[in-house]
Amino acid sequence: MKKKGEKPAASPGWVIVEEDYFYPLRFEADEVFHDAQMHFRRGEEKAAANEITRAASWLNFAASHGYPETQKDLKAAATELTSLAKDLRAGNLVAASRIDSVLARSAHALATWHYFMAQQSLAKDEMTFAAQDLQAASVYLQSAAKSAHLEYGAGAVAMFEDVDRDGRAVDEGVTIEPNRVQSHLDAIKAELNKLSATLKKDAA
């Protein structure tokens, strides 16, 4: 049993999420999304299915530790991912557009989850966790847009770069001002809402 604040030994299948524990995996799902697409494009359907199953487990995990505002979309995306992986393993014909749209909705759901985690941390005056989750929300927003074949304008890109710098800064022990975190929180929310509307429109 590890003490609070002590980095646990590597152990596949374990995700440490309590606030004072080592939390190294906030970007892992983004890597899984990327690997799933790469395997699919190479014609490696079963490898893609394995990555998509991993992604579904991440979304189910997030749903089980989520908020009422995020659980529905997280569970729906996890269900879509599971169905997609099943079809790939069965050798059923799967269009690239289907993978792209499912991964876009999944990444958006995770971005929203991290946004609400950041919002909660800000309310608790926990700037480190707020900045880290905003950084993750930014990463998943960009991942969702890439899967949906969308591009952000220069203003959004600059904001994402600032959010990323803050996330890396707090990892190094730098303190971020609450007003700056609030500003980024507002900007991330606006981008979440815009992308949500676009994804819903495309799915209609």
Image (cartoon, rainbow, N blue to C red):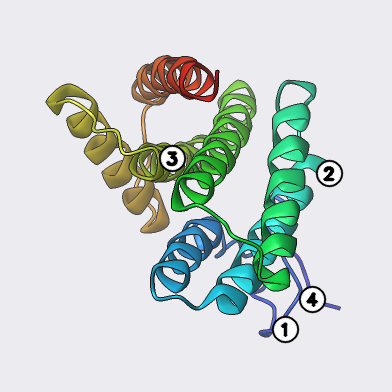
The span from disc 3 to disc 1 (Cα, nearest Å) is: 29 Å
- Between 18 and 65, the one lying in front of the other is 65
Callout 3 crowding tier (Cα within 10 Å): few <14, some 14–19, many ≥20: many
Q: Quick one: SS at disc 1?
A: loop
As measured in the structure, the alpha-carbon distance from the residue carrying label 3 to the one carrying label 2 is 21 Å
> According to the image, label 3 marks what residue?
144
Is any atom of residue 16 visible in this view?
no
The amino acid marked with disc number 4 is Lys
- Quick one: label 4 or label 2, which is nearer the N terminus? 4
- Spatial CA distance of label 4 from label 2 is 23 Å
Mark 4 neighbour class, 10 Å CA radius: few under 14, some 14 to 19, many 20 or more: few
**What's under tag 2, amino acid-wise?**
Ser
**Image height of 85 relative to 62, above or below:** below
Residue drawn at 36 percent across, 17 percent down:
183
The circle drawn on residue 11 is 1
Q: Nearer the viewer, residue 168 or 71?
A: 71
- Relative to residue 107, is residue 150 drawn left or right? left
The residue tagged 4 is: 2
